[in-house]
Amino acid sequence: MMQDVVIAGGGIGGLACALALTRAGQRVRVLEQSARLAEVGAGIQLGPNAVRVLNAWGLSDGLTECVAFPEALKVRDARSSATLGCLQLGATIRARYGQPYATIHRADLHSLLLKALRARADMDVSLGARVSSFAEEGDGVSVTCEDGRHLRGAALVGADGLWSQVRTQLLGAHPVRASGHLAYRGLALPQDLPAALREPVVTAWLGDRLHVVHYPVRRGEVFNVVAVVEGVLGQGHGGAAGSDPQSWTHDAHAADLTRALGPACSDLMAVIGAVRGWKLWPLNDRPPMAGPGEQARGRVALLGDAAHPLRPYLAQGAAMAIEDAWTLGRLRADSRYPVDWSALFARYAQARWARNARVQARSERNGRIFHASGLMRLGRNVAMAMMGESLLDQPWLYGGPHAPRAE
């Protein structure tokens, strides 16, 4: 009798993993620590690499109903409003990579994956189930939850995010790395934006030690706005050090963000002023992966932020989790039964770790470029003016993911 694969985490990465494995004929059981399956946050960008996977899973119609397809990526100066560079998206990017560039609300992507899974009979979900420990035992893995529940599976996938309990037991209790950056996130209605800023475009505003991105989601019915500034949580950011930033007021967030932006152009301030409610997150990550042992060991694998948390400066956090899931699904589909999960996970780790590490390193580097000041800022602006699209396009990234080696 086939044993379930246990997946810790019911966010985008966990549901993507569940969908990929069930499509390959594998039974799964998802353990979600929350009382309900839902997603928090606002918008995310999906490059052609992520859209390629979602379409391969049969989700193209559902995507079309809830995404926006921006026509361009524009980079502008936060102070002067001058355009520094532009990458054509829309039909251009679709012709180049065979897939479009899309923007979507996190909750809509989560709902799309969940709907696809609920149509399947080979998945079970347990809510309020946070993994506290696991043990490899012979031909399986036993899992214990914090509420005392015990279960057993053929293998375990930790998709439980940045603060992953599965990762901690598998790799040791290494603290996350504080970036020193704070992300303000909110939504704005098109009618609250100046007409010129309602275009179906991803706009990145670059300033000294900060940047702001805004783009349409939900077919253009709302705009996602993210402002990332460098600062220390609790010092002039709406509350005492150590308090929960999610509990702070919109007014406090708005005042702090305006102060952090300093002198900014009127177009950017119009975008900031159109947001009706800010939420604040401190950004944390981990150093780039150093080898396949950080992605899987034995019958336990890590996926998404549990393995390779990313800074948001390449807009690939969700995409890398989706690519991880796709790779696991491809390997499972190509496996003989009974499945040798240790060998399968070893191939998965070998296929994924270097690409994930490269995205981690590139994301960190982009943050330094986005937030540059002084001579580095001038050099960045000159390079964008001269090279433009070639700096913003990412063929090595958007052309993936690449099929893993089978047995």
Image (cartoon, rainbow, N blue to C red):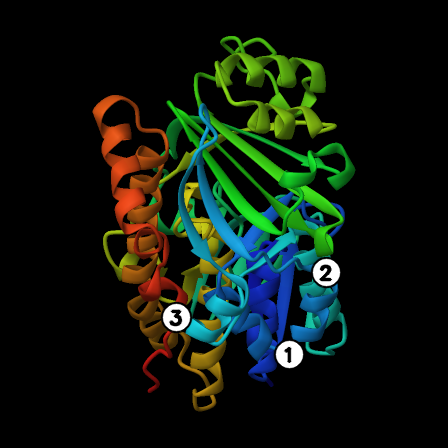
Report the quarter where the C terminus lies: bottom left
Of residues 16 and 296, the one nearer the viewer is 16
Of residues 237 and 67, the one nearer the viewer is 67
* Label placed on residue 66: 2
Please provide percent x and percent y for residue 343. 34, 76
How many other residues sit within 10 Å of disc 2, few (<14), some (14-19) or many (≥20)? some
How many other residues sit within 10 Å of disc 1, few (<14), some (14-19) or many (≥20)? few
Q: Which residue is mark 3?
A: 400
Residues at marks 1 and 3, CA–CA distance in whole angstroms: 18 Å
Residues at marks 3 and 2, CA–CA distance in whole angstroms: 23 Å
Between circles 1 and 2, the one closer to the viewer is 2
Q: Amino acid at mark 1?
A: Gly
Instruction: Name which quarter of the figure residue 121 lies in.
Output: bottom right
Residue 294 showing in the rendered view:
no
**Residue drawn at 39 percent across, 28 percent down:** 178
Please provide percent x and percent y for residue 261. 50, 18
Q: Which residue is mark 1?
A: 58
Please provide percent x and percent y for residue 191. 78, 37
Residue 203 higher or lower than 29, as above or below: above
Q: Using residue 77 as the reference point, say whether residue 17 is left or right of it.
A: right
Q: Amino acid at mark 3?
A: Gly
Furthest toward the bottom, the residue is: 336
